[in-house]
Amino acid sequence: MNNSGEIDITARVEAAVASAIYDMVLPIDTMGVTFHDGALDDVSEAYRADPDATLAAADARFAAHIATVAEAASDKEAEGPMLRARAAMALKERLREL
């Protein structure tokens, strides 16, 4: 919670993105994303409390990770941020299914 007593939506979204597990299935285009249950529960609670702010936080995390990808000096350096960007979008889609 922050000083005003509100849940810290950005922190919950970031924790969920960080907990992502990438299900590599051939072909690579079918790569899925799952999340640690605890982190997903936290961000789901945030979504129920304030859906617009939670989706905005997921969009912000996506944009931040894509910006890192764009600045990466190599594909190897871009790999981690690209996976986190993919997780942010997967999280957004998952929340919309609630």
Image: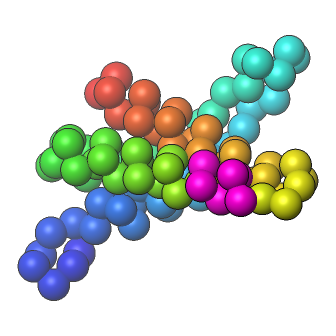
- Where the N terminus falls, by quadrant? bottom left
Q: Quadrant of residue 87?
A: top right
Image position of 45 with respect to 32: above or below? below
Model colouring:
rainbow
Q: Is residue 70 magenta?
A: yes
Q: Residue at x 49, y 50 (%)?
A: 63
List x then y, in percent, for residue 47: 25, 44
> In this figure, what is the number of numbered marks?
0
List x then y, in percent, for residue 78: 78, 53
Q: Is residue 86 left or right of residue 46?
A: right
Q: Residue at x 42, y 30 (%)?
A: 94
Image position of 90 with respect to 74: above or below? above
- Where the C terminus falls, by quadrant? top left
Image position of 75 with respect to 5: above or below? above
Q: Residue at x 63, y 34 (%)?
A: 33
Q: Residue at x 22, y 50 (%)?
A: 53
Q: Is residue 11 left or right of residue 2?
A: right
Observer able to see residue 53: yes
Extreme bottom residue here? 3
Q: Is residue 89 magenta?
A: no
List x then y, in percent, for residue 31: 73, 25
Q: Is residue 62 left or right of residue 6?
A: right
- Secondary structure mostly seen in the magenta stretch: helix
**Magenta residue span:** 66-71
List x then y, in percent, for residue 30: 73, 17
Q: Nearer the viewer, residue 62 or 9?
A: 62
Q: Nearer the viewer, residue 39 or 24?
A: 24
Observer able to see residue 39: no
